[in-house]
């Protein structure tokens, strides 16, 4: 940067004053002691004054003026050549430097007005307002145009504090490292990247094809919506065309169908008008279904399932624990491999009922038990058949006929009693020539049988009973009936 040096007006005043003083001193020395000159004084040589010189009129020193002590000029001082001060140059009034101003050291100016260029070889510090009426050029790389106020720079513009811009247009990449407030439109011809939170107090319009409405927060776009990272939407999202997620998941706008080639993970509540999956699916949290729930294969639930609408299975189903607050119906077999707690009546097609309040079991048809049944008691009001072994630890009562088709073993006493008719025991074979046999074990441990064969009635001694009927004596023989 070229430097030009010019004496300030104050320096020029000082130089003239010094010349005047020196000239006066010379005159005074030549003329004798203190002298007052009332007319013009002109000297062709040196004027030396050893004491104070007071010049009340115009002093012109064409040769120059040099003073070795402090000097004061109370009126205007004009210097046509260089104006130098070895110490402080103080001008209390306006200084006009038409030739320029050059300072070789640090200088402080209360107010400086420059009609031409203002150059600083080092730091130019201005502590108050600066009025620049011409262009500002910074080493040829940054310019402020006076006519328009435009600021142009070839390098980086760094502002460490608050900047208030009536408008801001950049033709290349720009970075704001701190907060950026925009009161009007914010437009980007290319990429607008925001690394932190963006607060938009009005509508956001993207080239007329995408809009965010400030009053409602709604976001509308006519084209594709891309997110390289997380896209978070806290309200309703309306998509009027297909939604494609990296080519692996698609939502079709015309049908609303959603298809994905990978896993669909939903961390919060999902409300589905319907849900159909053609492969294995896992719900790791609660699943609420208001309509039918169908599974073409296995439906596995690892925790509690609450079916408020009911449960219908068209095929074989296995349940680890099933709690039903209403009716439990089975169109086929209902198999329970563990304990069942039934807190209401059990009704089997209207023909068999178990009453919850009493535990009584009633059936209008046949009760068939293919395995061991342990009954605290057994009362039947009609004909009953036990096709297998029947073990009775207490009394066995029959209001009518007790028919036993196989061997009957009484481990204790056999008592028959009635108050309305003769007690009768009938032993009868199903057909002839088989007969009936009674087998008893004596106290000696020997088995005895009473059997009546075809020839026995005429072979033994006969007798006549009180009723007048004849009979014969029976004989017990050792042996077994079978």
Image: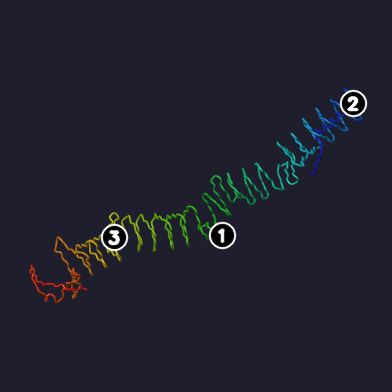
- Residue 352 is labelled as 3
- On screen, residue 167 versus residue 339, left or right, reads right
Q: Is residue 163 above or below residue 342?
A: above
**Residue 181 drawn above or below residue 370:** above
Point out the image quarter for the N terminus. top right
Mark 2 in CB contact with mark 1 (< 8 angstroms): no
Marks 3 and 1, how far apart in space?
60 Å
10 Å crowding of disc 1: few (<14), some (14-19), many (20+): few
Give the image location of residue 340, x and y in percent.
Answer: 34, 58
**Residue identifier under label 2:** 29
* Of residues 34 and 258, the one drawn nearer to the viewer in this rendering: 34
The CA span between labels 2 and 3 is: 155 Å
Mark 2 or mark 3, earlier in chain: 2
**What colour scheme has been applied to the protein in the rendered image?**
rainbow
Q: Is residue 68 left or right of residue 469?
A: right
- Residue 266 circle label: none
- Res 421 seen here: yes
Q: Is residue 340 left or right of residue 251?
A: left
Under tag 1, what secondary structure?
loop
Residue at 17%, 63% (x, y): give it.
Answer: 416
Camera-side residue of 47 and 352: 47
Q: Which residue is mark 1?
A: 247
């Amino acid at each position: 940067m070229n430097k030009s040096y010019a004496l300030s007006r104050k320096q020029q005043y000082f130089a003239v004053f010094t010349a005047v003083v020196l000239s006066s001193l010379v005159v005074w020395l030549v003329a004798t002691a203190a002298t007052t000159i009332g007319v013009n004084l002109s000297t062709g040589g040196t004027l030396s004054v050893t004491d104070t010189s007071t010049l009340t009129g115009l002093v012109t020193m064409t040769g120059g003026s040099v003073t070795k002590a402090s000097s004061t000029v109370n009126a205007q001082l004009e210097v046509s050549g260089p104006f130098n001060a070895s110490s402080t140059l103080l001008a209390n009034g306006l200084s006009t430097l038409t030739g320029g101003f050059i300072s070789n050291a640090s200088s402080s100016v209360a107010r400086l007005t420059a009609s031409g260029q203002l150059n600083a070889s080092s730091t130019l510090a201005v502590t108050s307002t600066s009025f620049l009426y011409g262009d500002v050029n910074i080493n040829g790389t940054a310019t402020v145009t006076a006519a328009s106020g435009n600021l142009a720079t070839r390098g980086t513009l760094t502002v460490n504090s608050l900047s208030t811009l009536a408008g801001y247009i950049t033709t290349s990449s720009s970075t704001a490292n701190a907060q950026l407030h925009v009161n009007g439109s914010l437009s980007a011809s290319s990429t607008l990247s925001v690394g932190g939170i963006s607060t938009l107090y009005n509508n956001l319009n993207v080239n007329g094809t995408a809009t965010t409405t400030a009053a409602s927060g709604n976001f509308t776009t006519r084209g594709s919506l891309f997110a390289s990272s997380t896209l978070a939407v806290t309200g309703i999202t309306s998509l009027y065309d297909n939604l494609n997620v990296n080519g692996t998941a698609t939502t079709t706008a015309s049908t609303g169908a959603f298809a994905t080639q990978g896993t669909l993970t939903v961390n919060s509540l999902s409300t589905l008008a319907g849900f159909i999956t053609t492969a294995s699916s896992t719900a790791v949290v609660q699943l609420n279904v208001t309509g039918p729930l169908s599974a073409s294969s296995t439906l596995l639930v690892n925790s509690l399932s609450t079916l408020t609408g009911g449960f219908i299975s068209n095929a074989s189903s296995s349940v680890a624990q099933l709690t039903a607050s209403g009716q439990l119906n089975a169109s086929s077999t209902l198999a329970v491999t563990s304990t069942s707690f039934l807190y209401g009546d059990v009704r089997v097609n209207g023909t068999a009922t178990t009453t919850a309040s009493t535990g009584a079991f009633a059936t209008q048809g046949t009760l068939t038990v293919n395995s061991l049944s342990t009954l605290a008691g057994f009362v039947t009001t009609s004909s009953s058949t036990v096709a297998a072994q029947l073990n009775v630890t207490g009394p066995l009562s029959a209001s009518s006929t007790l028919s036993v088709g196989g061997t009957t073993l009484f481990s204790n006493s056999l008592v028959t009693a009635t108050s309305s008719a003769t007690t009768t025991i009938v032993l009868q074979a199903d057909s002839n020539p088989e007969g009936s046999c009674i087998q008893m074990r004596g106290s000696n441990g020997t088995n005895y049988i009473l059997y009546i064969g075809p020839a026995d009635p005429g072979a033994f001694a006969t007798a006549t009973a009180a009723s007048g009927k004849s009979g014969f004596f029976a004989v017990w023989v050792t042996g077994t009936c079978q």
